[in-house]
């Protein structure tokens, strides 16, 4: 993915980009942690509303269970 491959996304809503307002919980957090570790994600930038904040908060409080969430 490069800069021009995201050209025009600024006006697109989250649904157009394949995102949603689902906040992960329970076993979904484990799956999310697995993917973060698999793809070696080293940082996370949350852009969005309350659902994005809530998802980031749940990841934060799950750091003791899922070490992959120990990212900035």
Image: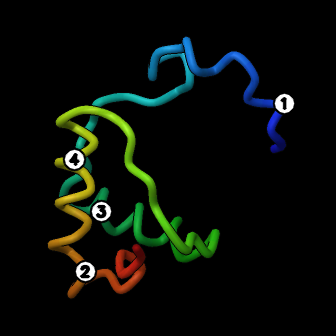
Tag 4 residue: 53
Residue 65: x %, y % from top left? 23, 84
- Which label sits in the foreground, 4 or 2? 4
Secondary element type, mark 1: helix
Say which mark, if any, is on residue 63. Answer: 2
Q: Work out whether mark 3 precedes mark 4 in sequence or the reverse, and give the earlier one.
A: 3
Check disc 4: other Cα within 10 Å, few if <14, some if 14-19, many if 20+: some
Q: Residue at x 73, y 29 (%)?
A: 6
Tag 1 residue: 4
Q: Quadrant of residue 60?
A: bottom left
The Cα–Cα distance between marks 3 and 2, rounded to whole angstroms, is 10 Å
**Residues marked 4 and 1 touching at CB (< 8 Å):** no
Secondary element type, mark 4: helix
- Which label sits in the foreground, 3 or 2? 2
The Cα–Cα distance between marks 3 and 1, rounded to whole angstroms, is 32 Å
Tag 3 residue: 29
Most foreground residue, 24 or 55: 55
Say which mark, if any, is on residue 37. Answer: none
The Cα–Cα distance between marks 4 and 2, rounded to whole angstroms, is 16 Å
The Cα–Cα distance between marks 1 and 2, rounded to whole angstroms, is 35 Å
- Which label sits in the foreground, 1 or 2? 1
């Amino acid at each position: 993915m490069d800069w021009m491959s995201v050209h025009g996304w600024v006006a697109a809503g989250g649904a157009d980009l394949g995102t949603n307002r689902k906040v992960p919980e329970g076993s979904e957090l484990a799956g999310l942690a697995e993917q973060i570790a698999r793809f070696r994600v080293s940082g996370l930038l949350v852009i969005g509303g309350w659902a994005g904040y809530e998802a980031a908060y749940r990841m934060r409080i799950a750091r003791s269970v899922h070490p992959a969430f120990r990212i900035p």
